[in-house]
Structure formats: structure tokens, C-alpha cells
Amino acid sequence: MTESTDMKNIKKSWFIWIISIPIILASMYFCFGQKAFVLAVSFIVIILIGMGIMRRIYAQALVLVGGCVLLLIAAFLFPDAAITGTSSGSKVIDVFVEIKNVFSKNIASLGLIIMVIAGFSRYMNDIGASGKLVEICVKPLGRLKSRYMLLGGCYIIMQLLALFISSPSGLALLMMSTLYPILRSIGCSKASVAAVIASGVCIDYGPSATGSILISEITGYDLFSFFVEKQIPVVWILFIFIGVMHMFVQAYWDKKEPVPSQDDSLLMYQQASAEKVPYLFALLPIIPMILLFIFSSLAEEWLPKALRFKMDVITAMFISFFIAFFCDLIRTFNIKKAADKIAGLFDQMGQSFIMIVSILLCAQVLAQGMIKIGFIETLFSFIPSGTHTHILVVLSFSILVFFSSVVLGTGSTFNAFAPLAAEMAKGAGISVYRVLIPMHFSGSLGRSFSPIAGVTIAVAGLVGLTPFDIIKRNALQLGSAYILMLILSHFLIV
């Protein structure tokens, strides 16, 4: 009886919304004119998409439908304006032609880059190369005598490894099987170690990060040059800041509420069942980064003219994949066993399309809808230009992405709003980098505050804690880092 009443109330509220929104929009149009109507319909679409995402409705569907609605309104509101490059003769059909154009353009470029990187990362894990890289990188930490210095060093090492191992959950689980036993054996509490490892990729950056690829694609800036010139000046300060903060904050929490020691036998060993791979395999995940650097504009002047080639991300990944495949084939001397591991590469490519590329495609459709309906131009015709406008745009989008990531447990909400934010930045005469880079970092920092983030749940579950135990120990340093990131982005990014 209660469920039936609740369902009736839900249907009633939906009916009211469906009736009231067109009436409100029509009133805006006839009372205040076309510009007010454009702003009203655009904000209503954005608000409804945001509300739907918060209610965990499938984000791709919301964003795609929102973009389609805006394109349809633009087609009838501005009959003389072109919706797509080559018209089909029908305004309605042109809307779907434009959606097709957006999909085909982005799948062939941005989508393929993301899928290939995801597949390569999975293949590195399957052949044991990622594990060997982590094993080698954590060894120098054993020379540090202070256990809290070790924790700070652990965080910095994880952020550096994130350049080559793009999955936060995958890297955290590798660290749990390699570094966790070492830190526990020298007296670090399991809560402090788990908190540091869970926050180890709280900042997504580098050429393999989806957000970096998206920003590079939007701006047309060389991906490796973007990483070196735009991201490194900010992230190295953040890494040191968070690492040092971990040393003091984890010590504080250990004194305030010591966590009772439980049986860690599940983790207190090096995986004996795992395949032994040569130390040379640790170089395999690094090969794409080396190739991208050698053949980037940064290293061009140091190379002889005969070696000044151009290489994109996908080409570097495929070259690295074939090198890794032949290394694994030589190691196993079993063509079937080596070939079977390639299945994981294509499986991960498919998963990345479902989880990441799809939202990017839908977000591009939404951005086109906003552009065609004139939302960007209209909005900034009402806002005075200047520093205050820049700060307002950056804070608005950064906070939106941050809290969306907290609610959803993923930093991919940046992908949904990045195209729109880029167009708004251009409309306001603001550097696109100053808007998109803080948004990108906000997504990954927000994910670290989420109790439903995959990496937080996985690490907390392995050590017998709750996600809130992890978040509580990371809140101060990551919250402070968020504020510092916004300040650094304002002064260091041009």
C-alpha cells in the first residue's frame, strides 16, 4: 500500500514538472525575450542533468538527451542557423546528423586514444610488468628509518607510478600486496598505511590520464608538452605538500585513536603463486612515456634531423605493445599462453568505451547543443569581463566536479562538463587551461573523499576498516591540497 502511494506521488511530481517547465519557458520567451529564454532552457537542462546524476540515473543517457533537446530547440528557434556542416534538408534530421558527426569524429580520435591506453595498461598488468615496476620502486623506501617518513614517501612513489599504471584501484592493490607488508612490519598502523595507499592517486595527471587526453584534444596542444608545461609546475608542489601532510596527520590519528591490530595474514606475504618475471619487464610500462618524450617538440632540438620524427600516443602504445608481446613470448616460449593474454587488452578497451568514452561522446553532444542554442554568447553578454569572471567560472566548475565526484565515487564527471567549460572559458576570454586543469584535479580529489570510490572500498575491505575510517584520516591533507591546487592553478597556469 505504501509503495503504491509513493509511486503515485512520484508520478504526480513528474507530471507537475512536465507541465510546469514548458509553461515557465514560454513565459520567459514572451515576457523577457529570446536571450532570457535561451539562458532559462540551458540552465534547466543543466540542473535536470545534475539532479539526475545525483540520483544515480545513468549519466550518459541524461547528457545525451539534454544535448539532443538543446539541438532540437536551436533548430526551431534559429531556423536560419546551420545545425550541421552539410544540411540534409530537414532541421530535425540535421540534429541527428550532427550527433552522428560528433560521435564519428571523437571515436576515431579521443575515444581510440583512451581505449588503447586502457588496454595497454591491462596488458602490462597481465604479463606482470606493472607488478615488477612497483616491486622495484618501493625498495628504496626501505632505507628510510622513520615510519611516518616512509608513509609520506609511499604516497609520492604512488603518484609517480600513476604515470605508468593508470588504474587507481589496480595500483592500490599492487601496493597492498608489495608495500603494505613492509610498512606493517616496521610498526606502521594498518589504518595509516591503508589511508595513504587509498589516497595514492588522488591527483590524476600525465599523458595516460583520461582528463589530460581530453584537455589536449580540446585545446589542440601536444599531449606530452601539456603534461610537462602545464601539469608538472602544479603537481610536484602538491605531491610534496600531501606527502609531508600525511606524515603529521597519520601520526596524529595514530595517537588519537589507535586501531586494534587484527590478523593481516592475508596480506603479509609476497604472492607466491604469481608468475616470476625478469626485472627487465619493469621497463615495459615506461616505454610509451620514453617514446613520447623523445619524439615530442620538447626534445626535437636535441635530436639530429634524421631522427626528428613525429609520434602520437596511439602509435607509441602499439609500438610498446609489440615490444612487450615479444618479450613475453620469449619469456614463456609458449605462443598460445602469450597470445591468450592479449584478450585482456581488447576486453579492457571495450570496458573503457562503456565507462569512459561513452560519457565523453555524450558530453560533446551537450556542448554542441549549448553552442548552437547560443548559451555561451548570451551568458557572457550579461557578465562583465575581468578577473572576477575568471575566478567565478573556475570555482563554479571546479566545485561542481568536486562534489559530483564525491557523490558518484569517480572522477569521470570532469569528462561530462569539460567541453561545456571550455566553451564558456573561450566565450569569457579566459585561458582554457586555467579552467580545465583545476576541474580535472577536482575530479580526482573529490573521488578520494567518496565512500563509494572503488579504490577506497577495496583498500578498506582488505584491512577490515570502513571507507569512512580511510576518508577521515585523509580529509585534512586532501582538503588543504584542494585549496592549494586552486591557488597554484590561478598563479602558475597561463
Image (cartoon, helix red, strand yellow):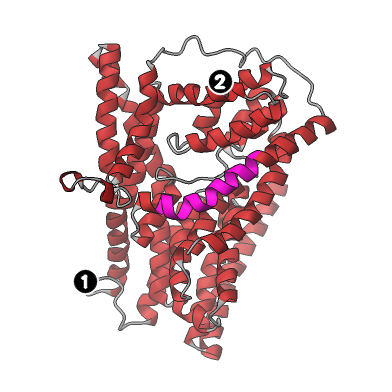
Return the residue at label 2. Answer: 177
Relative image position of residue 401 (x, y in whole percent): 57, 56
- Please state which amino acid type lies under the numbered disc 1: Thr
Q: Nearer the viewer, residue 134 or 420?
A: 134
- Please state which amino acid type lies under the numbered disc 2: Ser
Q: Which residue sits at x=76%, y=33%? A: 251
In the image, the segment drawn in magenta is: 226-243
Relative image position of residue 162 (x, y in whole percent): 48, 37
Judged from the image, the secondary structure of the residue bearing numbered disc 2 is: helix
Relative image position of residue 13 (x, y in whole percent): 64, 63
Q: Which residue sits at x=53%, y=66%? A: 46
Q: Nearer the viewer, residue 467 or 219?
A: 219
Of the two numbered discs 2 and 1 in the rendering, the one whose residue sits closer to the viewer: 2
Judged from the image, the secondary structure of the residue bearing numbered disc 1 is: loop
Q: Which residue sits at x=63%, y=39%? A: 243
Return the residue at label 1. Answer: 86
Relative image position of residue 72 (x, y in whole percent): 38, 71
Seen in the picture, residue 78 relative to 320 is either above or below; the reply is below
Q: Is residue 90 magenta?
A: no
